[in-house]
């Protein structure tokens, strides 16, 4: 054990010496770094001052050229836009002029159609509401076809009566009565069909005029919408373009001058920042060297303590193993909750574990300490045997 402690001291001493050497080198490197940073800051400041002056001159010339080009382009774009919109307005007025007669015709047909349907409110209009009336006996009697055929039949009866001296037989009277009934039934249907045909023709013509006017009005509305949309879009695009140009110029100027100002501030602060950074870096490097030295010393002590602890732990495991029964069930298959806790001098690992439920009654309850039969086979195979139930056992008297 004394040899182990001596070895730990030697290792710790070597580590401590290495840490001291590293700390000295870090301090020297930090000092060199600080001096180089100060020299670089001075040279950088002088170079940036010259660069900023040249950049500002070039920036002023560029902005002046951009403003002149933008002004010239704006005037040309505005003139072209005015000519384009004037031509579109002229075409729209001509289209409205050409469609006007059709619109008036549609209005006339619409008004007459509303009169005939009785929807206009102009009750004094000719035929007001006639298109909404139902067919009646009066309408049939006024039908020219019905009146003509009835008159011709009556003339035939009168000629027959005159030929007989004004006398009519009973059969002739019945025939005349039947003729009048048949004529009334047949001609009512014919007169109704002629009435409906005439009405549909009259209303259809008015509806055609109405459709013509509606199409004309729709064409005018479309032309007006197109003109309005074209004007809005054209002036909107022009305004947006002008806004973009102005915004770009403003943003460009702002960014350019802001960049110049920022670069100037950065240039004048560069030297100070470099010097502060160098001093800070030197201090950090020196601190790091001191901390590294302390860490190395602590590490050396910690490693020595760890080695000493492991040595004591392995000695305890060796003593515990020597007190175990000569033979015990040590097959890994009958154990659970296994945790390594040490190493014997012969290289075998020592574990803490519990036996599985079927084997606790035979080999013990609770936490146990021992080796694994499978590992013992690799080093001391003669210490391993097989239980009648098939699992492996270890003779602990052979592995002390």
Image (cartoon, grey):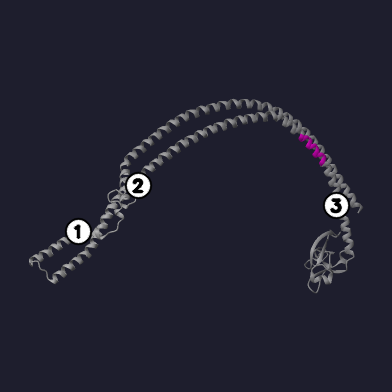
Q: In terms of sequence position, does the residue under pointer 3 or pointer 2 come before the other?
A: 2
Most foreground residue, 171 or 372: 171
Is there a contact, CB below 8 Å, between mark 3 and mark 1?
A: no
Q: Whole-Å distance between the Cαs marked 1 and 2?
A: 38 Å
Q: Which residue is mark 2?
A: 214
Q: Is residue 365 magenta-colored?
A: no
Mark in front: 1 vs 2: 1
Observer-side mark, 3 or 2, equals: 2
Q: Disc 3 vs disc 1: which is toward the camera?
A: 1
Q: Residue at x 59, y 31 (%)?
A: 254
- Looking at marks 3 and 1 on the same chain, the residue that comes earlier in the sequence is marked by 1
Tell me the residue that label 1 is attached to. Answer: 145
Q: Position of residue 152 (x, y in %)?
A: 14, 61
- Residue located at (74% from left, 31% from top): 275
- Quarter of the figure that contains the N terminus: bottom right
On the picture, is 59 further left or further right than 73?
right
Q: Residue 252 appears at what percent x and percent y?
A: 57, 32
Q: Secondary structure at mark 3?
A: helix
- The number of discs equals 3
State which region is magenta.
Answer: 280-291
Of residues 166 and 232, which is closer to you in this image?
Answer: 166
Give me the residue at 87% from left, 54% from top.
309
Front-most of residues 226 and 195 = 195
Tell which circle, 1 or 2, labels the residue nearer the N-terminal end: 1
Q: Quadrant of residue 323?
A: bottom right
């Amino acid at each position: 054990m004394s040899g182990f402690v001596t070895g730990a001291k030697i290792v710790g001493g070597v580590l401590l010496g290495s840490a001291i050497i590293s700390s000295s080198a870090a301090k020297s490197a930090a000092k060199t770094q600080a001096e180089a940073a100060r020299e670089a800051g001075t040279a950088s400041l002088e170079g940036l001052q010259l660069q900023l002056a040249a950049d500002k001159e070039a920036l002023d010339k560029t902005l002046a050229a951009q403003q002149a080009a933008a002004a010239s382009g704006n005037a040309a774009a505005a003139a072209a836009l005015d000519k384009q919109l004037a031509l579109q307005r002229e075409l729209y007025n001509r289209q409205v002029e050409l469609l006007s007669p059709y619109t008036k015709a549609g209005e006339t047909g619409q008004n007459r159609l509303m009169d005939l349907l009785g929807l206009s409110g102009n009750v004094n209009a000719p035929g007001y509401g006639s298109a909404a009336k139902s067919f009646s006996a009066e309408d049939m009697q006024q039908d020219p076809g019905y009146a003509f055929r009835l008159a011709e039949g009556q003339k035939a009866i009168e000629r027959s009566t005159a030929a007989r001296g004004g006398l009519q037989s009973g059969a002739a009277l019945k025939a005349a009565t039947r003729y009048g009934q048949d004529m009334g039934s047949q001609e009512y249907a014919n007169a109704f069909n002629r009435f409906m045909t005439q009405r549909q023709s009259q209303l259809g013509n008015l509806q055609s005029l109405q459709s013509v006017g509606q199409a004309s009005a729709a064409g005018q509305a479309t032309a007006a919408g197109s003109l309005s949309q074209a004007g809005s879009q054209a002036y909107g695009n022009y305004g947006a373009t002008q806004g973009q140009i102005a915004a770009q110029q403003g943003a460009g100027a702002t960014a350019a001058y802001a960049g110049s100002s920022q670069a100037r501030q950065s240039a004048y602060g560069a030297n100070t920042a470099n010097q502060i950074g160098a001093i800070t870096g030197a201090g950090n490097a020196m601190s790091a060297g001191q901390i590294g030295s302390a860490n190395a010393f602590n590490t050396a002590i910690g490693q020595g303590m760890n080695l000493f602890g492991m040595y004591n732990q392995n000695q305890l495991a060796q003593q515990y193993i020597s007190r175990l029964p000569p033979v015990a069930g040590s097959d890994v298959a009958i154990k659970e909750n296994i945790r390594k806790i040490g190493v014997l001098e012969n290289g075998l690992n020592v574990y803490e574990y519990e036996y599985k439920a079927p084997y606790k009654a035979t080999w013990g309850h609770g936490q146990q300490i021992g080796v694994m039969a499978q590992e013992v086979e690799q080093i001391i195979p003669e210490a391993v045997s097989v239980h009648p139930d098939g699992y492996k056992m270890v003779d602990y008297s052979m592995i002390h």
